Amino acid sequence: MQRFDVIVIGAGAAGMMCAATAGARGRSVLLLDHAVKLAEKIRISGGGRCNFTNSGARADCYLSENPHFCRSALSQYTPQDFLALMARHGVAWHEKKLGQLFCDDSSEQVIALLDAECSAAGVDRRMGVEVGEVARGEDGLFTVATSEGGFAAGSLVVATGGLSIPQIGATPFGYRLAEQFGLEVTPLAPALVPLTFHADDAERFAPLAGVSLDAEVSCGKASFRESLLFTHKGLSGPAILQISSYWQPGDALTVDLLPGVDVEALLAGNAGSAQRLANLLGEYWPKRFADAWLAQQQMDWKVSEVTGRRVQKFSDAVHHWRVLPNGTQGYRKAEVTRGGVSTRALSSKTMEARGVPGLFFVGEVVDVTGHLGGYNFQWAWSSGFVAGKNC
């Protein structure tokens, strides 16, 4: 059985960062992955340009049972630290919007950067390796049975990701391993995922597939203003992906379809006009949407007909459109998994499991879920770095 100081299971963003960091400390590191292609999730992210971090990454941009858990890792390895790494490798980048940073060229550059860091640190990387039984002996060593034989190490890092995008190899392996060692796993659900309509709404709004508009979408205390996109099945777009992380089955969404616009003042400024509301709103909305939404609300009126109580009724409908989703499009369309290995079971300073010395969990497998826009990659870099410094 071949012996290493550290075995990292999962050669994605968090796993490679951890392996490179541990290797740079002089630790002998074995990096294993069942996939043949390296870091496929990085490759497909950001339309192939990888939204690799967000310059505004901070703890309140993450969901977790313990909202403070991610603070330590994020402070130990910041977006600026990753930008310094990008600079050392000559990878150019740009800010798209809202602090979202993308490669100028290709996500392949981020993969190559991490691979180069692992190689420079002497990491033994093996792809296409099936991992079987994992055990911990009385001597504290972890043994890992694989399709390439058995390996042992004093430290084991689990960086196997979540359940999102199973078509590129996502599995529940990390969660099962956590439970094997007595660690709690919080409830799991697709996050950053499109939402679906009930049948009636799906039929009514099907002709709007592809229509996008600026909106503010709220669920409970959470609220996001970005674009909203109608699909053949329901709603998507950044505002919906963001709110989906907070949505629970049965919850209704409140949508402000004209954020920042005083509808009552707009009506007053056009009082007595013979034009239809659809034409007035056409200055703000795609015409197809204005027609369909007003029909659904039974408000296909002329502007001159919106008087008295109708003014407040119309304003409320526009600013507080209630949408009751039927569900989500599931893990196949989800960017990440909400929930995971409980933060109560881990040290926030090291990512090591409490009560199981030498066992670490990093990245998406942990109950830390970032907002859309590079936050989840920053969590991968930060948690991977912290574990790499301590494993």
Image: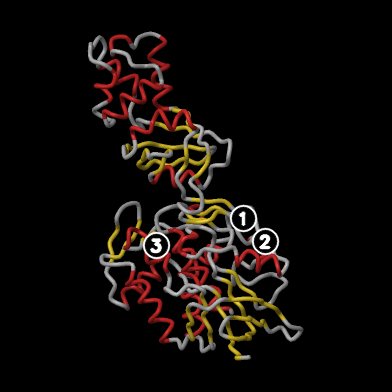
Q: CA distance from mark 2 to mark 1?
A: 8 Å
Residue 183 appears at what percent x and percent y?
Answer: 70, 65
Q: CA distance from mark 1 to mark 3?
A: 22 Å
Q: Residue at x 40, y 66 (%)?
A: 42
Residue 203 appears at what percent x and percent y?
Answer: 42, 30
The image quadrant of residue 236 is top left
Q: Residue at x 60, y 67 (%)?
A: 174
What amino acid type is highlighted by mark number 3?
A: Thr
The residue that mark 2 highlights is 344
What color scheme is it? secondary structure
Work out whether 71 lies above or below 127: above
- Report helix, strand or loop for mark 3: strand
Q: Nearer the viewer, residue 23 or 38?
A: 38
The residue that mark 3 highlights is 53
What amino acid type is highlighted by mark number 1?
A: Asn
Residue 127 appears at what percent x and percent y?
Answer: 47, 79
Q: Are marks 2 and 1 in contact (CB under 8 Å)?
A: yes
